[in-house]
Amino acid sequence: MAKYGLRTIAIAYLFFLLVLPVGLIIWRTFGDGLQPVVDALSSPSAVHAFQVTLTVALWAVAANTVFGIGTAVLLVRHSFPGKRLLNALIDLPMAVSPVVVGLALILVYGKFAPVGGLLESWGIQIIFSTPGMVLATVFVALPLVVRAVVPVLEELGDEQEQAAHTLGASRLQAFLRITLPGIRWALAYGIVLCLARSLGEYGAVAVVSGRLVDQTQTLTLFVEERFQNFDQPAAFAAATALALIAVITLLLTKLLRPKG
Amino acid sequence: MTTDVAVRPAPPPGPPGGGARARSRFSVPGGTALGLGSSVLYLSLIVLIPLAVVAWRSLDEGPGYFWRAVTTPDAWAALTLTIGASALVAVFNLVMGTIIAWVLVRDRFPGKAVVDTLIDLPFALPTIVAGLVLLALYGPESPLGINLAYSRAGVVLALLFVTLPFVVRTVQPVLLELDKEMEQAAASLGASPFQTFRRVILPNLVPAMLSGTALAFTRSIAEFGSTVLISGNLPFKTQVAAVNIFSQIEGDNTTGAAAISTVLLVVALVALVSLDFLQRWGSRRG
């Protein structure tokens, strides 16, 4: 009896908290057929928001992938003073509110901050423009690739790499031929997580972008702006598109997740 | 969002090559130094320096100003609501997360794999979409007739949604590895199912349950996107700290925003340090 009771509680909780709300939005989106959805998502503002989102996410994922691989190799294969500290600091972005991320970047790279002012005088605008949004996205997604690669790199060991070295392979050759193939699934897993986080970021980007419609508006900002302006169909359509991306991410991570 | 990687803070990686290439502690070879330099530079420019500037700016105009900024009626109301709601959400997650993890590990029913996959959905779903989705079901146009919009219950609901995976995903692996023989031994010695749970299973789960709860608490403290739409951001009533910071930034009061941000950072760090402590305590016992 207790078994069925617990099962019912768990499933009812998940149903009312997760399944029903997400299902309702999808049902409402497609309630009037496919055409309104296509119309809403092909409006110039929506298309522009898609483009901004993709640009920002791709730059952020590229930067975090390079940093992620480099730092994972550093943490696993090298020893240096302060390693524990570096390892702890990498998780720091997980504990920071997205709004605080945005504020922090404005205080350093904003027009009226020393660094931001200097860059501005060189004609480089960070805040209220794409570079700032990339920085914010990099910040929030920073630990994901490192944390996906580190355990696999540890498990892999470095015997094969050393064997490659003794056979005359350069550092780069050993990395490309031995290390990279060894970590490729973990790396793909980390990149998928990082991409999903980057596409879906809202708070940090809302602060640093200035939320300029048709300029710095990402898809998540588009959802909020359309909803506040009583354009429910567009907000629901974009939300459903983002939810679809989330579901694809879930399925991909299920496939790629390192076993054990 | 994010799944596993975020849920289980990794232990520091071990020494290189099983310690085979022991070096003197302070001589770092050229390649390592270059890599380390780039890594630290990247982390500093994007994360460390900006966060340090927030803390520094919050004390820009003296500790008196900091204190006044944090204790203005609307900021104080936002902070107490955030911490109170987060504590409530953490405790609720502790119970529900453990029940869900238990059902996923010990129960068998058709569709279990789907349910297991669904648990990670709140991590994958953008927070603004989470808020919108909840508002559609539990807002003014609710088909269930339940309207939680612009109420504190709505804030709690949003926080429950985004923190759902934490306790489930920390308790589940521990439960999977738990030795069933211990339970059988307890049962054969005459323990009731409740006694077995209370004396044998629960002590093994407590460290994981508590670290999941701490993660959920930290996440709730910081949450912004999911609460924006459903809370309506009414100062003194439903405005959480992150939204208060946001409106202060919009109003160009960066020093005030920095002060409340610093409080949030400190609360999160305290929770994470306690989490680290819990994990060490757990691994000592395990």
Image (spheres, coloured by chain):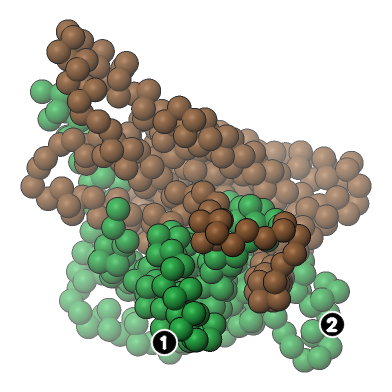
Identify residue for label 2: A118
Chain identity for the colour brown used in the image: B
Residue B224 in view of the camera: no
Which chain is indicated by disc 2?
A
Identify residue for label 1: A47
Residue drawn where x is 79% and y is 77% of the image: A116
Q: Is residue A33 left or right of residue A192?
A: left
Q: Tell me which amino acid carries mark 1.
A: Val
Q: Position of residue A79 (x, y in %)?
A: 63, 61
Q: Residues within 10 Å of mark 1 (few under 14, many from 20)?
A: some
**Above or below B24: residue A170:** below
Mark closest to the chain's N terminus, 1 or 2: 1
Give the position of the N terminus of chain B as an image quadrant.
Answer: bottom left
Q: Are marks 1 and 2 on the same chain?
A: yes
Return the residue nearer the eye: A233 or A144. A144
Q: CA distance from mark 1 to mark 2?
A: 33 Å
Q: Residues within 10 Å of mark 2 (few under 14, many from 20)?
A: some
Judged from this view, the residue extending furthest toward the left is B110
Q: Position of residue B255 (x, y in %)?
A: 81, 56
Return the residue nearer the eye: A159 or B132. A159
Label annotation for residue A235? none
**Above or below B284: residue A121:** below
Which chain is indicated by disc 1?
A
